[in-house]
Image (cartoon, helix red, strand yellow):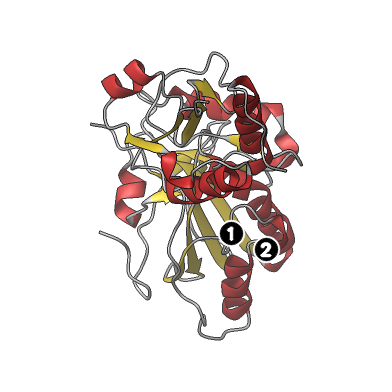
Amino acid sequence: MSAPRIELLYWEGCPSHPRALAELREQLAATGLDPESVEVREVVTDADAERERFTGSPTIRVDGRDVVEAGDEPAILACRVYHRRDGRISPVPDPRDVRDALRRALTAHGRTPSA
Amino acid sequence: MTLAIGSKAPDFSLPDTAGDLHGPGGGAATVVVFTCNHCPYALAWHERIADVARDYAPRGVVVLAICSNDARRYPRDSYAAMQERVARDPGDWPMPYLHDATQEVARAYGAKTTPDVFVLDADGVLVYRGAPDADSDDPAQRADWLRAALEDLLADRPVARATTDPVGCSIKWAA
């Protein structure tokens, strides 16, 4: 059985990506995936942002799908605004949104997520 | 270059969202906060800074929020967007929201991030610079570093923690 592709895209002008990567790796381990399997890519230029459809840093994708849909947000080199499930604004996604995206992907790959 | 603790802060006069001009001074202390509309750190800390403005206004503290970002590349930080934000939730703005269109004030202060907090005494001397508190994600921190600096200043004590590292989105400089 295959594993989902996990990507973390970041822009150096925003300080949130180390925390986002650490929290993503925690969720990967919790769902039974390899925490080291993350493809980490820096988005440097406006052209990079357009090409990657990068709507802010950090952006986490599982099998090409954003863990939090960005809607019609424009491509931009900026920090991304996330909302925690309790309503707080945060520079990183709610870990539960990341976990749910990973679990959906695992199921799509015919695998059973860890508890 | 960043303004040093103990140095006289640059004076300025900037328009708020109604066009009225504001600058530091006229109170026991002035809190200058570089902030913006699009940054999650600035948004997460906003209510805590607004609470400081409400809580310390009776004690003569003036809080000035300033947006200095390049609106051409970041239209969410345009003057019009600032005006829309204040008009949408005027209760969220117990302090004026000033537009630094030329970015001269941000450069003069050496602001690096949104937010970046500068506390000036009654003579306009810098006594604190840094983050509002230790964690943008934790509202329970209540901008404690900023409050502690104000308490020291208002009690005529040296500010015990005069500098912390500002944390947030980089100021978006015009090319």
Looking at the picture, does residue B151 appear above or below residue A73? below
Residue B151: tell me if it is visible.
yes
- Give me the residue at 56% from left, 60% from top: B132
Residue B15, x across and y down, in percent: 48, 37
Do the residues under discs 2 and 1 have CB atoms within 8 angstroms? yes
Direction from residue A95 to residue A34 in the image, left or right? left
- Distance from Cα at disc 2 to Cα at disc 1: 7 Å
Looking at the picture, does residue A65 appear above or below residue B50? above
Q: Secondary structure at mark 1?
A: loop
Say which chain tag 2 marks. B
- Pick the residue in front: A107 or B88: A107
* Label 1: how many Cα within 10 Å (few below 14, some 14–19, many 20+): some
- Pick the residue in front: A103 or B170: A103
Q: Secondary structure at mark 2?
A: helix
Q: Between disc 2 and disc 1, whose residue precedes? A: 1
The answer as to whether the residues below labels 2 and 1 share one chain is: yes
* Label 2: how many Cα within 10 Å (few below 14, some 14–19, many 20+): some
Q: Of the residues shown, which amino acid type is indicated by label 1?
A: Asp
> In the rendering, which numbered label is found on residue B77?
none
Extreme residue in the top direction: A72
Direction from residue B68 to residue B102 in the image, left or right? left
Q: Of the residues shown, which amino acid type is indicated by label 2?
A: Gln
Residue B95: tell me if it is visible.
no
Residue A105, x across and y down, in percent: 60, 25
> In the rendering, which numbered label is found on residue B135?
1
Residue B142, x across and y down, in percent: 68, 61
Q: Quadrant of the C terminus of chain A?
A: top right
Say which chain tag 1 marks. B
- Give me the residue at 37% from left, 73% from top: B5
Looking at the picture, does residue A106 appear above or below residue B167? above
Residue B27, x across and y down, in percent: 58, 64
Residue to which mark 2 is pinned: B141
